[in-house]
Structure formats: structure tokens, C-alpha cells
Amino acid sequence: MTWRPASRDDRTVAVLWATTIVVGVALRPVWLAAAPLLPHCLWHAWTGLPCPGCGTTRAMMHLLRLDPAGALRYNPLAAIGASAFAAAGLAAPLVAGIAGRVPVFHQGPKPLLVALVGVAVAANWIWLICSGV
Amino acid sequence: MSETPSYTPPPPPPPSPEPPAWLPWEAPNAGLGSLLPTIGGFLVNPIDSFSKMSLTVDLVRPIAYYVIVALIGSIFDLIWGLIFFQSMLGVVRQFLPAESWSQLEPILRAPTVLGFILQLVVAPLVALIVVFVWTAIVHLVLMLIGGDRNGFAATLRTQSYAWTAALAQAIPFVGRLVALVWGLILQIVGLSEAHKIEGWKAAVAVIAPLVACCGCLVAAIVLFGAALVQAIHAAS
């Protein structure tokens, strides 16, 4: 990973990212009201086993109630991913706007990273099955 | 002896003006009037439209297009909800297990005008969150498979224009399903053009997150759409 000067697009993306997080938290009552209306997981209904995304909605609801432990119990990968996304989103305007630099990742396929993500998804799924989410 | 007049060929016709190399929405000084030609372009010839999509024009433009189109789609969705609420409720009741229906029934209320206005205010904000989070997921997969040649902004531009598919919500009952399928196609075509990558990479970036995270939700939408079509056939 290297760093380069932030472009106009980078600054727009950074502001939009932070706005997404702030608006997402501000709309907390909407999410809490809408969550029960979401359909139940058909995969779970058919097989009796959770799918890799099962528990994500409940994890997000716990995060919105500032209960990270509850969120981790329902879907650890989704809880960690969402927390990292939110933290990076709040930091983005500082990095792009004030420091004026943005990270650049090496282009091209990343087999090691693909393997790591695959292992993380599989481990998360095993956790969901074992914990009976 | 009279001279025969020499034949002078007619002047060649003036060259036909070349089609503009940009999207109408991204043309300099483009106004709201450019919205319809842009939508038409993505409807009739999405490959050509995505190939004209600028990667340098101010990012606010595609995002503004997205918000407008998503809002129009929401308005259609809300109108159908107001008109067909009772009949849709009947179909849902027919296909849901009794236990699920008893849980759902108390929270289902007919849409009101106040609710309509509130949703119009909230819809663009929710749309903004949805497009940004979805773009982040798709771009992550693109990075993993080496398809992120033109950066996150190019993916965001593509997603903004691919949301033209939200206009399919103008079709009652099956509009959401049509929007979902059309949207997936537009995203694949757009990512392929924006990042100059093979179609399969674009398809993997769009479909893999759906399968991994939202497989059950997609299956639910598809099954619900199929059930609605079946119910409409049975009623007619």
C-alpha cells in the first residue's frame, strides 16, 4: 500500500462516506421500526441451518443500540465489518481533507487476501451454525 | 460550335454531426432536461451509455442523478402501495404460513398521506446509504479479483447510473423484481465498461456478495415475485 495526494473525487467520496455513517445513525428509529418487517431467511426455513448472512440484521440492531457484544454474538463478521466501515468512514474526511492523502492499494488479483476472506466467511458461518443463530 | 457545359459534381454533403461523446446528464451546463435522454440511453443502449460515462466529471453529478431516479422509483412504489395495499395484503396472507401472518398482521397498516410524505423525505437518505454501502461491498470484491482499475469513484459512478433500473418500479406488482434483475444487468455492463474489465469479473463482483450475504433475501424476492405472478394469473 502506498499513498498519493487526494483528488477532488477522493474528497467527495470521503465526505459522502462520513455522511452515510452520520445519516445511518440518525435514521436509527427507522431501522429499528423496519427491521421486524424484513422477511425471514428462506435458507434457514428450508434447511434448518443459518446462511452466511443470517443474524446480520440483528447484529446491526445491537450495534445501533451500542451493544457490540450482542452484535458479535449474532454475526461476528458483519459486526466487525460494519464497525470498521463506520470507523473508516468517520476518519475518511480527516485523511483526505486535512492530511490531503489517500491510500492506494496494489492492483491486480490478490489470492492471499481472497483466501483470507474465504476463511473468514467460512469461520463465521461455522460459528453461526454452532451458536444456532 | 457550342461548348457543352462541363459537369460539376454536387458538393459532398456536410459531414453528419458526430454523436456527443458524453452522457446528456454530464454535458456542460446540462439541466434537468437532460434527465430523460440519459434515462433513455440506459434503457435502449446501456453499453453505449456506460462507454460515454465520464470518469472525470464532478462526482456530484452521477450521485444527483441517482438520488433523483431513486426518488422517482420510490414515488411509484408508494403510489402502488396506496392503490393496491388491500389486494397485496390478500396475496401475502395467501402465501404466508398462518404463524408468520399472525406475527406480521398487527404491524401492517394501510399507507397514509402523512406516511407517504415522510417516506418521500426519508427515501433519498436511505437511497444514499444503500448505494454507498453496496458500492463499497462490490468494490471490495473487485479489488480482491483485480478488477478495480479506475478506483472507487468509477464504481460509485457506475452504481449511480445503474440505479436507472429503479424506474422499473413504475410497473405494478412485479416492478421491484424487474428492477432487481435489470439493475444487476446494468451493474455488470457498467462495471465492465468503467473499469475496462472482462464481463465475468464484473458479474462476480455483483453476484458474489448477493450469494454470500443476501442469498436468502434474493430467494425471498424471487419467490415472492413468482407467487405474485401466479396469483395474478389465477385471478385473471
Image (cartoon, rainbow, N blue to C red):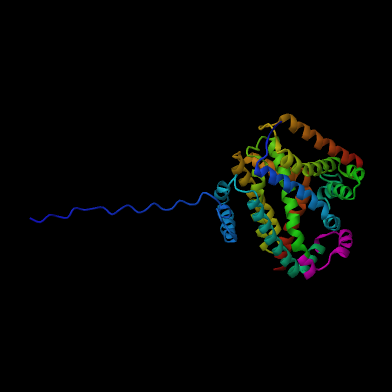
Give whichever of A75, B99 is nearer the camera: A75
Give x and y (percent) for residue A15.
Answer: 73, 47
Give x and y (percent) for residue B15.
Answer: 39, 51
B159 displayed left or right of B223: left
Give whichever of B92, B121 is nearer the camera: B121
Q: Quadrant of residue A28?
A: bottom right
Q: Is residue A39 visible?
A: no
Inspect the magenta stretch and tell me whether residue A85 lies in it: no
Q: Is residue B117 visible?
A: yes
Give whichever of A108, B186 is nearer the camera: A108
Q: Quadrant of residue B141?
A: top right
Quarter of the image with the N terminus of chain B is: bottom left
Give x and y (percent) for residue A59.
Answer: 87, 47
Residue at the outermost left position: B1
Quarter of the image with the C terminus of chain B is: bottom right
Residue at the outermost top position: A112
B12 is higher (above) or lower (below) than B118:
above
B80 is higher (above) or lower (below) than A81:
below
Question: At x 60% / y 45%, what residue is drawn?
Answer: B56
Identify the main secondary structure in magenta. Answer: helix
B29 displayed left or right of B144: left
Give whichever of B75, A96 is nearer the camera: A96
Tell me which segment is drawn in magenta: B94-117
Question: At x 75% / y 59%, what residue is drawn?
Answer: B123
